[in-house]
Image (spheres, rainbow, N blue to C red):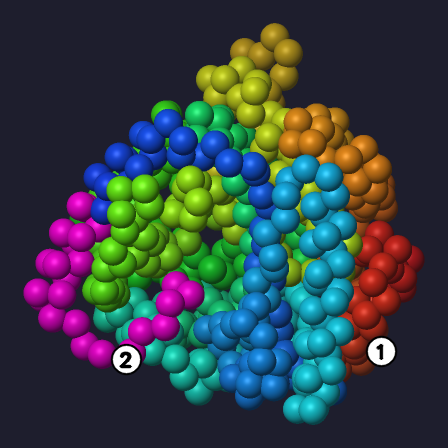
């Protein structure tokens, strides 16, 4: 979805040609991945950070295209809404000190970003959902004027044929209808990429799925939406509902939601996930690209297949790259933006460490945790954060047992350390970033719970809208300090 395309109408012939191409490219991908040298290069880690733009009154600042002109930096790109931009970080080797490098680049880029944003009376802020958003900010008036976003909004709405229903239960339920896609853009994330060896992909991906609830619970940073205390990680519910093009008809089969936890454990390798997406989801933007010629020693770009994959949003997604010998990587999409650069890098370290560390033992788990249990755990973690209970295997198990997710996170710290060790991450690096997770767990606080508790405290002396603004100002100042969330003031205590 990073490709820009011109606003246009598509014909039936466009859909037919596009569909043929993605099926043909699926076969090409299978051939490319069968090459002995594919996926044998040195492993790298990468990340993308989506960022909100606000003004001094803590309201959205819809100036992303103007700001991008000032930045003049290709690592910054536009996002769906005018008040969001994306920072694409440089990929770093998994060995050594990858998370320190990610932390430093975030800080360095934010210095440049802050300098240019000030010229537009704007502040960048990394948070999963902006607490001061209002329903008016979710209208197409705030959509970035690029062709790919206009077409995506048009086609999803056309397929559904009726407004999207956003209904999120929680402490303070949220319930409204919208015909526009901008509600999806309210979600900002820290998307982490991990290259994998092709013969380890299935085990690593399954381990990533299984451990995702622990990542989400400890990283939660989307506790307030439209001024309401919602889920600790409200993005999960909002993203699914704001992109759900399926007409709610219980009498007929419906294709799976485009924002999904997944459809089952991976059996053999990455190719089946690409095949699943091609065969389960109809194309919604059949853009045909000029094919790039390549000789027998180069890997094909597979542009249409790549574009189609970008119109579905599983929380963990396979990414194909033709660069060099070619590789497949896992994109971890569930982590939210913020609260601090150190927190985000620690979330990446914990998430990647668990996936790699558990991959060698994953077969011991899959028969004891059916896929639907893992999905159940994911939504429990999103709703309740560190207060969630999940289904987790026990010794001498003869039925599923619920246990506090905090206990599982504590166990997984050792697994994550093993995984990072396997990747060649330096010991000091492992200790530094996993200790950030440990301290957050001991303090019992995440960005999501901090926001809700701070807002409730401020409501005692301020109306809700002013309390949201004041809370966000405190959050912003803490983010500038660079301290991890476990060190932030907890005014309710």
What is the CA distance from the residue labelled 2 to the residue labelled 1?
49 Å
| Image quadrant occupied by the N terminus | bottom left
In this view, the residue farthest toward the top is: 396
- The residue carrying mark 1 is 461
The picture places residue 63, in percent across and down from the top left corner, at 56, 86
Magenta segment boundaries in residue numbering: 1-24
Residue 97 image position (x, y, % from top left): 74, 43
Q: Quadrant of residue 267?
A: top left
Name the residue at 55% across, 85% down.
Answer: 69
**54 or 204, which is in the foreground?**
204
Residue highlighted by disc 2: 7
- Foreground residue among 132 and 346: 346
Question: Position of 17 compared to 325: left or right?
Answer: left
Viewer-side label of 2, 1: 2
Q: Decide whether residue 23 is among the magenta residues.
A: yes
Element carrying mark 1:
loop
At a point 79% along the width and 67% down the height, the residue shown is 479
Residue 286 figure quarter: bottom left
Up the image or down, 115 lies above or below 475; here it is: below
């Amino acid at each position: 979805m990073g490709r820009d395309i011109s606003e246009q109408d598509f014909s039936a012939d466009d859909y037919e040609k596009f569909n043929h191409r993605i099926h043909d490219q699926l076969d090409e991908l299978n051939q490319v991945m069968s090459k002995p040298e594919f996926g044998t290069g040195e492993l790298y880690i990468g990340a993308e950070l989506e960022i909100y733009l606000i003004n001094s009154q803590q309201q959205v600042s819809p100036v992303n295209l103007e700001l991008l002109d000032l930045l003049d930096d290709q690592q910054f790109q536009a996002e769906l809404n005018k008040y969001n931009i994306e920072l694409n970080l440089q990929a770093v080797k998994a060995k050594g000190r990858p998370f320190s490098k990610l932390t430093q680049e975030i800080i360095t880029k934010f210095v440049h970003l802050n300098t240019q944003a000030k010229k537009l009376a704007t502040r960048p802020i990394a948070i999963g959902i902006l607490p001061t958003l209002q329903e008016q900010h979710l209208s197409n008036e705030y959509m970035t004027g690029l062709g790919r976003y206009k077409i995506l909004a048009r086609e999803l709405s056309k397929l559904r044929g009726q407004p999207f229903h956003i209904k999120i239960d929680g402490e303070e339920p949220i319930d409204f209808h919208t015909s526009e896609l901008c509600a999806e853009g309210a979600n900002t994330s820290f998307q982490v990429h991990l290259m994998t060896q092709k013969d380890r992909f299935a085990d690593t991906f399954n381990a990533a799925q299984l451990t995702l609830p622990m990542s989400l619970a400890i990283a939660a940073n989307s506790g307030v939406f439209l001024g309401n205390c919602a889920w600790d990680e409200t993005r999960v519910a909002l993203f699914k509902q704001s992109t759900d093009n399926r007409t709610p008809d219980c009498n007929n089969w419906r294709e799976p939601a485009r924002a999904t936890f997944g459809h089952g454990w991976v059996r053999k390798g990455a190719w089946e996930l690409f095949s699943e997406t091609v065969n389960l989801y109809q194309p919604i933007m059949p853009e045909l690209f000029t094919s790039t010629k390549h000789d027998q020693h180069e890997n094909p770009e597979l542009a249409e297949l790549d574009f189609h994959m970008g119109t579905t949003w599983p929380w963990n997604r396979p990414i194909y790259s033709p660069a060099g010998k070619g590789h497949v990587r896992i994109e971890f999409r569930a982590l939210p933006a913020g609260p601090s650069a150190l927190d985000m890098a620690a979330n990446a370290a914990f998430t990647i460490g668990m996936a790699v560390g558990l991959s060698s033992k994953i077969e011991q788990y899959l028969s004891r945790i059916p896929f639907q249990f893992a999905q159940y755990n994911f939504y429990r973690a999103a709703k309740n954060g560190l207060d969630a209970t999940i289904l987790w295997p026990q010794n001498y198990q003869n039925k599923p047992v619920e246990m506090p997710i905090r206990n599982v996170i504590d166990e997984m710290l050792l697994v994550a350390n093993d995984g990072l060790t396997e990747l060649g991450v330096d010991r000091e690096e492992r200790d530094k970033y996993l200790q950030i997770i440990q301290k957050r767990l001991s303090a019992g606080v995440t960005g999501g719970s901090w926001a809700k508790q701070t807002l409730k405290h401020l409501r005692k002396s301020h109306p809700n809208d002013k309390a949201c603004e004041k809370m966000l100002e405190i959050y912003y100042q803490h983010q500038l300090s660079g301290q991890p969330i476990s060190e932030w003031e907890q005014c309710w205590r």
